[in-house]
Amino acid sequence: MAVKIIGAAPNGNLLGTGSTQDLMMINNPRFFIRTTADYLLFQETIIRDGKPDAFFLYRAIREALAEAGLANAESVSQDVINEVAAGVVALGNKNPIPLEGAVLKNFPLHALSLNIKLLENSRL
């Protein structure tokens, strides 16, 4: 649920953009962002794409990499994550070839377990 309080900051809010305060409430034991670095990436994704969908796809891919045994999943370049993400999108269009190619090219030692993790997680 989101709430906008009008007139909450009569002298201007912290950003100096108005007199309102926005609150977002989530009924979940975990916050949707784990770290400040993730929050920065989340904001950059919204600014760049106009919607947060890509951030959650990128995060799910990094989590699948970690679950597949890749120790440095967080340090994989964004270009590689983008390539795998394009494969996941193609998978949604019933075309598994781009995903398999991206995974095999970038993660040959973890290809099988990563493909299984990405396929298991059909909500990607």
Image (tube, helix red, strand yellow):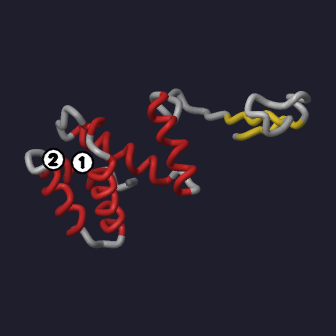
Q: Residue furthest bottom?
A: 94
Based on the displayed image, in which of its 4 quarters is residue 66 positioned?
top left
Q: Picture coordinates of residue 112 (x, y %)?
A: 12, 51
Q: Secondary structure at mark 2?
A: helix
Q: In the image, is 68 to the left or to the right of 28?
A: left
Q: Residue furthest left?
A: 109
The CA span between labels 1 and 2 is 6 Å
Q: Nearer the viewer, residue 27 or 107?
A: 107
Q: Residue furthest front?
A: 16
Q: Residue at x 84, y 31 (%)?
A: 12
Q: Which residue is mark 2?
A: 113
Q: In the image, is 20 to the left or to the right of 68?
A: right
Q: Are marks 1 and 2 in contact (CB under 8 Å)?
A: yes
What is the quadrant of the N terminus in the image? Answer: top right
Q: Which residue is mark 1?
A: 117
Q: Residue at x 77, y 38 (%)?
A: 3
Q: In the image, is 113 to the left or to the right of 58?
A: left
